[in-house]
Amino acid sequence: MDDGVVIGDGTRLWHFTHILPGTRIGRDCNIGQNVVIGPDVQIGDGCKIQNNVSVYKGVTLEDDVFCGPSMVFTNVHNPRANIRRMDEVRDTHVGKGATLGANCTIVCGTNIGRHALVGAGAVVTRDVPDYALVYGNPARRHGWVCSCGVRLEAEGEPVAETETECPGCGSVYLHGAAGVRPVSGVVK
């Protein structure tokens, strides 16, 4: 761990983890082995970063984000070995409660919405809305998920807002042309 790092109470770091200067990690996080974070990265409370993940400058994780094993954040949009472009970092923001599946790739400059779920192996090249379920290469929206992670029965693009209930926890959402939004339930 380098100088100038702040780590919140209850956060655990596993073997072979390197935290670079200016990085702030919140409370009660779990950082797996062979992880590199920083420099100047902000990680919220309750995040889980599994093994073999690098979180580079320009990435911000809100609270309760899950980064699956070996998922990738890129940090330069058009890298070349012979051209230094570390000052051209494009910011990537991951919203509260989002899940980034194992081996997915998040191309720099994209935003992942709150409670979104990115499937294993997906390649995300554009912004992901709140509560969206995306997967594939390139990643496309294939539905919506509750904040508890269960797929919602909200499909298609309705003309008017309709209610949908999570089959897992009973939370209620409104599904409309702009996506889904919580009405009641476990949403934090």
Image (cartoon, rainbow, N blue to C red):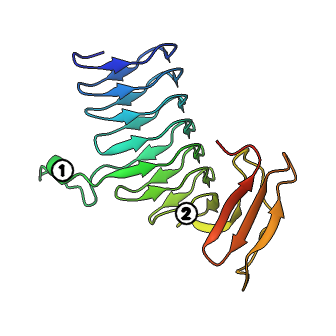
Residue reaching furthest to the front:
184
**Residue at coordinates 30% horizontally, 49% vertically from top-left?**
75
Please provide percent x and percent y for residue 65. Answer: 54, 39
In this view, 102 is above or below 9? below
How far is mark 2 from mark 1, CA to CA? Answer: 33 Å
Query: Does residue 153 appear anywhere in the picture?
Result: no
User: On the image, which quarter does residue 96 sit in?
Assistant: top right
Q: Is residue 182 left or right of residue 100?
A: right
Please provide percent x and percent y for residue 30. Answer: 54, 22
On residue 129, which mark appears?
2
Mark 2 residue crowding within 10 angstroms, few (<14) / some (14–19) / many (20+): many
**Residue at coordinates 40% horizontally, 26% vertically from top-left?**
25
What's under tag 1, amino acid-wise?
Ala
**Residue at coordinates 47% horizontally, 40% vertically from top-left?**
62
Q: Point out the frontmost of discs 2 and 1.
A: 2
**Residue at coordinates 38% horizontally, 42% vertically from top-left?**
60
What's under tag 2, amino acid-wise?
Pro
User: In the image shown, does 90 or 71 lie closer to the viewer?
Assistant: 90
Regarding mark 2 in the picture, which secondary structure is present there?
A: loop
Quadrant of the image for the N terminus?
Answer: top left
Q: Is residue 20 left or right of residue 176?
A: left
Regarding mark 1 in the picture, which secondary structure is present there?
A: loop
On residue 156, which mark appears?
none
Please provide percent x and percent y for residue 147. Answer: 69, 48
Q: Residue under circle 1?
A: 81
User: In the image shown, does 79 or 8 lie closer to the viewer?
Assistant: 8
In this view, 96 is above or below 40? below
Mark found first going from the N terminus, 2 or 1? 1
Please provide percent x and percent y for residue 100. Answer: 56, 46
User: In the image shown, does 54 or 30 lie closer to the viewer?
Assistant: 30
In this view, 1 is above or below 120? above
